[in-house]
């Protein structure tokens, strides 16, 4: 085959370059189109069901960074400074409402034990501290750089804005461990019960840092229940303790509010399981009914959960009887201007 003349080689290279550029443009357009379609489907699902899953929202390295950051915090934590046990059953208002360590944790990083992890009479831990925690909260997004970086990321901001939140306050974050075998049940509830604004405006961003399965306590939600009224409010009582105020007459509540009735199962009550891979994000409307069952497996189910409400600039008012209150004169964090990048 004769060698191409210099002008022939130039023309062939130009043709190859044009083909490569067209392929690249097609590839990126296809990726962008797929991304746009997926984003639109998530928004539709969220508004229709009150719940939606964004697959692969966080990368494997983001999940690893959050897991190892929490490892380091737990390593530093001295269990002797904590005797607080986190409960969501009928004893919740008694357990948390009189607990100053919990009640002042909105603007701090505090450690809460699983009910089965401590001998309540002696205060002795019954498991190694790495396996004894129920959760760490409630201002990781303020004080711990890895979690703050995620909460303030451009993708979190863009997602929340795309769902309709205009000027949200980032009011609460929690790292939940759902420990192997002792990770407890979270009874059916609406998040707006605990994070009340008038009008209601709560949204939860539930990020799986490990796979969430049927045996390690995945999330369950009742699609469409976000259209139901807010049933009760975990509110400060006149004597200073916390309790549940009814916002809807109790006889109108679904039978599972606060407790799955004996003999019932989540699916018999209309809940569906939300199986997740590490990195998947579940969006939870503040009024949607949701729960998780105990972890009966040998694997943990770590999640990072971020809650926002609409701010006063968008017409929502934080309720003065909510458990979570910042010190006088201090405002909840918002998205920083850098998160627009
Ligand atoms: Fe919740």
Image (cartoon, rainbow, N blue to C red):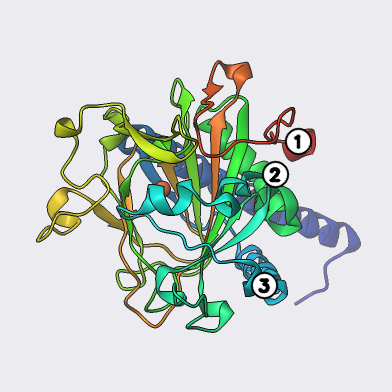
Cβ–Cβ under 8 Å for marks 3 and 1 = no
Q: Which residue is at 62% across, 49% downward? A: 105
Would you say residue 217 is visible in this rendering? Answer: yes
- How packed mark 3 is, by other alpha carbons closer than 10 Å (few <14, some 14-19, many 20 or more), is few
Cβ–Cβ under 8 Å for marks 1 and 2 = yes
Q: Which residue is mark 3?
A: 68
Q: Which residue is mark 1?
A: 336
| Mark 2 close to ligand 1, CB under 8 Å | no
Q: Which residue is at 70% across, 44% downward? A: 152
Of residue 291 and residue 123, the one placed in the foreground of this image is 123
Of residue 39 and residue 337, the one placed in the foreground of this image is 337
Give the image location of residue 251, x and y in percent. Answer: 14, 33
Cβ–Cβ under 8 Å for marks 2 and 3 = no
| Mark 3 close to ligand 1, CB under 8 Å | no
Q: Which residue is mark 2?
A: 152
Q: Indicate the secondary structure of the residue bearing disc 2.
A: loop
Give the image location of residue 82, x and y in percent. Answer: 60, 66
Which corner quadrant holds the N terminus? bottom right
Q: Indicate the secondary structure of the residue bearing disc 3.
A: helix
Vertical order, 203 against 71 (above or below):
above
- How packed mark 2 is, by other alpha carbons closer than 10 Å (few <14, some 14-19, many 20 or more), is many
Vertical order, 110 against 300 (above or below):
above
Q: Residue furthest left?
A: 263
Q: Which residue is at 30% across, 52% downward? A: 90
Which corner quadrant holds the C terminus? top right
**Left or right of 143, for residue 125:** left
Vertical order, 147 against 330 (above or below):
below
Work out whether mark 2 precedes mark 3 in sequence or the reverse, and give the earlier one. Answer: 3
* Cα distance in 3D space between marks 2 and 3: 19 Å
Using the rendered view, name the quadrant where residue 237 is placed.
top left
């Amino acid at each position: 085959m004769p060698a191409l003349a210099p002008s022939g080689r130039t023309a062939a290279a130009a043709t190859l370059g044009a083909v490569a550029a067209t392929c690249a443009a097609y590839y990126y357009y296809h990726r962008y189109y797929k991304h746009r379609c997926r984003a639109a489907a998530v928004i539709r699902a969220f508004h229709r069901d009150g719940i939606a899953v964004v697959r692969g929202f966080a990368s494997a390295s983001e999940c690893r960074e959050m897991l190892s950051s929490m490892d380091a915090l737990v390593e530093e934590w001295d269990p002797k400074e904590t005797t607080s046990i986190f409960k969501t059953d009928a004893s919740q208002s008694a357990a948390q409402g009189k607990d100053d360590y919990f009640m002042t944790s909105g603007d701090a990083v505090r450690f809460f034990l699983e009910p089965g992890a401590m001998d309540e009479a002696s205060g002795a831990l019954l498991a190694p501290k790495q396996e004894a925690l129920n959760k760490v909260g409630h201002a990781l997004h303020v004080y711990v750089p890895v979690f703050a970086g995620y909460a303030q990321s451009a993708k979190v901001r863009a997602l929340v804005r795309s769902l309709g939140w205009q000027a949200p306050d980032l009011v609460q974050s929690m790292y939940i461990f759902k420990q192997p075998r002792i990770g407890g049940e979270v009874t059916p509830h609406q998040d707006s019960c605990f994070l009340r604004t008038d009008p209601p405006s709560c949204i939860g961003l539930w990020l799986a840092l490990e796979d969430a399965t049927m045996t390690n306590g995945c999330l369950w939600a009742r699609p469409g229940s976000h259209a139901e009224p807010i049933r009760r409010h975990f509110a400060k009582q006149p004597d200073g303790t916390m309790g549940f105020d009814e916002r809807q007459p109790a006889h109108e509540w679904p039978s599972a509010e606060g407790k799955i009735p004996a003999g019932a199962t989540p699916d018999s009550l209309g809940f569906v399981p939300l199986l997740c891979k590490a990195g998947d994000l579940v969006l939870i409307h503040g009024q949607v009914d949701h729960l998780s069952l105990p972890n009966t497996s040998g694997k943990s189910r770590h999640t990072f959960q971020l809650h926002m409400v609409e701010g006063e600039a968008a017409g929502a008012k934080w309720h003065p009887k909510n458990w979570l209150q910042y010190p006088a004169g201090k405002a909840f964090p918002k998205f920083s201007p850098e998160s627009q990048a």
